[in-house]
Amino acid sequence: MEKAKFLETLIKEQGYNLKSFAAACDIPYTTLYGIIKNGVGKAGVDNILTICRHLGITVEELEEMAAGQEEPKKPAGEPNFYDIENLIARNGGNLSPEEKLRLIQLLSELK
């Protein structure tokens, strides 16, 4: 399967549509749409890096997926920064003001 289709599938699996994902990545919707419809090969490197980072994969994992592997190889263990960032970005609107304050307090305590 081509890389753009894998990206589109991953975007949808994470609960986004193209417009909301483009906004989360801070790239224009038309840019993301063009990448999905015209292929990754015609896209700017910075855009592909941004998209992959927000999906929690590397460009190498995207290559592996396109080469025939079903899922990217992820090390077992705790979620990485981008996994947590995506989770907060998708669900942050559902948090109460108290929950948001507690999250900020927890983050400020990290060393």
Image (tube, helix red, strand yellow):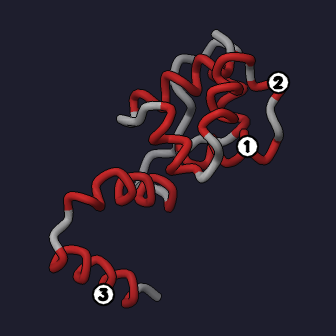
Which residue does the numbered mark 3 point to in the structure image? 105
Which residue does the numbered mark 1 point to in the structure image? 47
Q: Which circle, 3 or 1, is nearer the viewer?
A: 1
Q: Is mark 3 on a helix, strand or loop?
A: helix
- Residue 99, numbered circle: none
Tell me where residue 87 appears, x and y as whole percent. Answer: 36, 53
Residue positioned 73% across, 43% down in the render: 47
Please, is residue 97 above or below residue 111 in the view?
above
Tell me where residue 6 appears, x and y as whole percent. Answer: 58, 21
**Mark toward the start of the polypeptide (3 vs 1):** 1
- Could you tell me how far apart the alpha carbons at marks 1 and 2 are, in whole angstroms? 11 Å
Discs 1, 2 touching: Cβ within 8 Å: no
- Could you tell me how far apart the alpha carbons at marks 3 and 1 are, in whole angstroms? 32 Å
**Mark toward the start of the polypeptide (3 vs 2):** 2
Which of 30 and 80 lies nearest the eye of the viewer? 30
Q: Is mark 2 on a helix, strand or loop?
A: helix
Name which residue type carries label 3: Gln
Q: Quadrant of residue 31?
A: top right
Q: Residues within 10 Å of mark 3 (few under 14, many from 20)?
A: few
Tell me where residue 24 appears, x and y as whole percent. Answer: 50, 50
Name which residue type carries label 1: Asn
Residue positioned 66% across, 17% down in the render: 37
Name which residue type carries label 2: Gly
Which residue does the numbered mark 2 point to in the structure image? 41
Tell me where residue 88 appears, x and y as whole percent. Answer: 35, 59
Q: What element carries label 1?
A: helix
